C-alpha cells in the first residue's frame, strides 16, 4: 500500500510514491541519529563539594565538551531522598534520557528498580556493586578498590606523624566508609605497629555528607588529643577537617603541625599548607568512559572495580604537596604501592572480612 500524500519533513518533500514503511524507516533512522542524552543524579553534598560529586561532574563536562552527546544532557543536585526519586522518575519517563547515572551509594540504591521498569534504557551506578540486582541486564556498576588507596595514605599518615597518633573521620557510618577505614588503619600499622588510631563518624544519615561544622568539631577534638594527621572521607563535610587543621596551626602557642588527607578528588590545592595528600578515586574517568562506550555501542551491563593498577585509585602528588616529602619517602611510598599491586602486600577488605564473620 502506498501513501497518496506529499509529506514535508525537515524542509524536504518526500514523494508520495514512498511506502508508509519507508517513511517510518526514515523517521526511525533520524531518531537513531540523534546524539544520546545523558542524565546524572549527584549525591547529596552538591557539585561544589571538591570531592566525589565534583569528580563526577568533571567527567560529565569532559564528555559534553569532547563527545557527541546531546546538549540537553544534564545533571541535578538533590537535597533529599524524595528529590532523588523524583529526578530519576523524570529522567526515565519524561526526560528521554539514553543513559541515566547515579553518583554514590545513596542515589544508586534506587537504580535496580528503575532499570527493571525501564529495560530499554541504560544505567550507570557509581560506588556500588549491584550485579545481583541487574535483572534486566541494563546496569553497569562501578566500584573502586578504596581500601588499597586508603592503605597507601594510611602509610603516609604514619610516616608524617610525629606523635604516633593519627585519626580518621568518615561521613555517613556505612560499610563503604568502613572499607576506607580498614585499609587506612592497616596502612598506618604497616609503618608503625604501635600507632594509635582514633575513628569518628559525622552521622548515620545521608546528611552526614554535608555537615562541615560537625566534621570540624570532631577534628578539633582529635587534634586536641594529640593526633597530628587526619584522613577525612566525608565528602563536603570533610572541608571542615581542613579548616580545623588550619585553625590549630594558627594557634600561636601550638608548635606542632596538624595535617589532613583529602579524598576522592585531588584536594591538595584547597589548603596546601595542611593537606599532605589525597586518596583519589577517578569517578570522572568512570563517568566519561561509560558515556563514550554508549556512543561507541560498547556499553556492557557488568561490574567493574578500578584499582591502583589501572589508576582508578591513587595518592595525589603534585606541586602543592611535594614540599612535605623527602626523596626517600617518595621511594618508600611508591614501593608500598607496587607491593600492593603485585600482591606482596594483601590489604584487608572490610567487605570480605564481614563475609567471613557472617559465615561463621
Image (cartoon, rainbow, N blue to C red):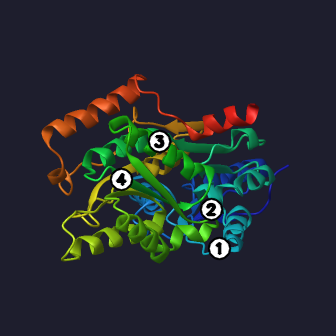
Where does residue 295 sit, x and y in percent of width and height? Answer: 52, 46
Where does residue 119 sit, x and y in percent of width and height? Answer: 76, 48
What residue is disc 4 on? 165
Separation (CA) of disc 2 from disc 3:
66 Å
Where disc 3 sits, the SS reads helix
Task: Determine contact: label 2, label 3, CB under 8 Å.
Answer: no
- Taking the image as shown, residue 167 lies to the left or right of residue 358, namely left
For residue 25, the mark is none
What residue is disc 3 on? 183
- Between tags 2 and 4, which lies in front? 4
Where disc 2 sits, the SS reads strand
What residue is disc 2 on? 13
Report which quarter residue 315 is drawn in.
Answer: top left
What residue is disc 1 on? 80
Where disc 1 sits, the SS reads loop
Query: Considering only order in the chain, which callout, 1 or 4, is on the residue closer to the N terminus?
Result: 1
Amino acid at each position: 500500500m502506498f501513501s497518496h500524500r506529499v509529506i514535508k519533513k525537515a524542509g524536504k518533500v518526500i514523494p508520495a510514491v514512498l511506502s508508509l514503511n519507508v517513511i517510518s524507516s526514515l523517521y526511525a533512522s533520524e531518531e537513531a541519529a540523534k546524539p544520546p542524552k545523558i542524565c546524572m543524579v549527584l549525591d547529596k553534598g552538591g557539585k561544589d563539594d571538591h570531592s566525589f560529586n565534583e569528580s563526577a561532574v568533571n567527567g560529565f563536562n569532559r564528555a559534553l565538551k569532547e563527545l557527541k552527546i546531546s546538549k540537553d544532557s544534564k545533571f541535578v543536585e538533590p537535597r533529599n531522598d524524595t528529590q532523588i526519586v523524583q529526578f530519576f522518575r523524570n529522567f526515565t519517563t519524561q526526560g528521554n534520557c539514553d543513559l541515566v547515572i547515579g553518583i554514590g551509594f545513596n542515589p544508586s540504591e534506587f537504580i535496580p528498580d528503575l532499570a527493571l521498569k525501564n529495560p530499554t534504557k541504560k544505567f550507570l551506578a557509581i560506588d556500588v556493586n549491584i550485579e545481583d540486582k541487574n535483572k534486566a541486564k541494563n546496569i553497569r556498576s562501578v566500584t573502586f578498590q578504596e581500601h588499597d588507596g586508603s592503605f597507601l595514605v594510611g602509610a603516609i599518615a604514619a610516616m608524617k606523624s610525629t606523635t604516633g597518633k593519627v585519626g580518621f573521620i568518615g561521613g555517613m557510618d556505612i560499610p563503604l566508609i568502613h572499607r576506607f577505614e580498614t585499609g587506612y588503619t592497616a596502612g598506618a600499622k604497616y609503618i608503625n605497629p604501635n600507632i594509635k588510631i582514633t575513628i569518628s563518624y559525622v552521622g548515620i544519615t545521608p546528611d552526614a555528607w554535608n555537615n562541615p561544622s560537625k566534621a570540624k568539631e570532631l577534628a578539633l577534638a582529635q587534634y586536641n588529643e594529640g593526633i597530628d594527621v587526619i584522613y577525612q572521607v566525608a565528602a563536603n563535610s570533610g572541608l571542615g577537617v581542613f579548616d580545623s587543621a588550619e585553625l590549630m596551626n594558627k594557634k600561636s602557642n601550638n608548635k606542632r603541625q596538624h595535617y589532613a588527607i583529602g579524598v576522592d578528588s585531588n584536594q591538595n590545592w584547597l589548603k596546601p599548607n595542611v593537606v599532605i595528600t589525597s586518596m583519589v578515586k577517578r569517578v570522572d574517568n568512570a563517568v566519561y568512559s561509560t558515556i563514550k562506550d554508549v556512543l561507541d555501542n560498547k556499553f556492557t551491563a557488568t561490574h567493574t572495580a578500578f584499582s591502583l593498577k589501572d589508576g582508578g585509585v591513587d595518592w595525589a602528588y603534585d606541586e602543592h604537596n611535594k614540599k612535605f616529602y623527602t626523596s626517600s619517602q617518595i621511594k618508600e611510598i611508591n614501593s608500598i604501592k607496587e607491593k600492593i599491586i603485585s600482591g606482596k602486600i594483601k590489604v584487608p577488605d572490610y567487605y570480605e572480612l564481614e563475609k567471613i564473620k557472617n559465615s561463621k
